[in-house]
Amino acid sequence: MTEPVGQLASISLDCPDPDQLAAFYSGLLGLEEAFATPDRGVIALAGAGPMLTLMRVDSYLAPSWPEGPQHQQMHLDIAVEDLEPAMTGALTLGAITAGHQPAPKQWRVLIDPAGHPFCLTAVRPD
């Protein structure tokens, strides 16, 4: 194996309101604000490996999943011990349940307040 050029520092999500999404993901993942631009157009959250960075995009269009004109380009899988209480917690924070649930015993698909699909999963590698 060759030496890596670098390490993954952050995963960035476009959104219309970084403050709203920062509050949601801080509560969902137990993250803390590590950085914000003066206008709060970019907010980086830390505390779980790579940072999660939320970036304001004025022309943001929420993905439509599983079909639609604005397809998702990525999503987060969030490891949980038990799907039912994790679902309750995420819904309390402002997530909504996606209409399409392809494997509900392994993953629960939710939508964050900006419209990004994400999954809660109890699947673990062997």
Image (spheres, rainbow, N blue to C red):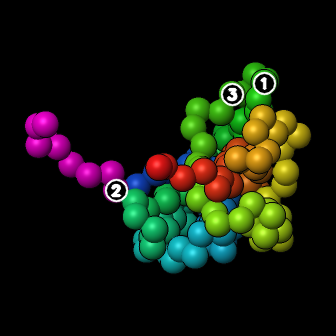
Precedes in sequence: disc 1 or disc 2:
2
Residue in the image at 81% along x and 39% along y:
101
Task: Read off the magenta span.
Answer: 1-9
Q: Which residue is mark 2?
A: 9
Residue at mark 3 to residue at mark 1: CA–CA distance: 7 Å
Residue at mark 2 to residue at mark 3: CA–CA distance: 25 Å
* Residue 126 seen by the camera: yes
Mark 2: amino acid: Ala
Left or right: residue 71 versus residue 3 is: right
The answer to whether residue 7 is magenta is yes
Q: Which residue is mark 1?
A: 67
Mark 3: amino acid: His
Residue in the image at 55% along x and 57% along y:
54
Q: How many marks?
A: 3
Characterize the local packing of mark 3: few (<14), some (14-19) or many (20 or more) Cα atoms within 10 angstroms: few
Mark 1: amino acid: Glu
* Residue 36 seen by the camera: no
State whether the magenta stretch is mostly helix, strand or loop: loop
Residue in the image at 76% along x and 29% along y:
66
Label 2, secondary structure: give it: loop
Which of the two residues, 5 or 12, is positioned nearer the viewer here?
A: 5
Label 1, secondary structure: give it: loop
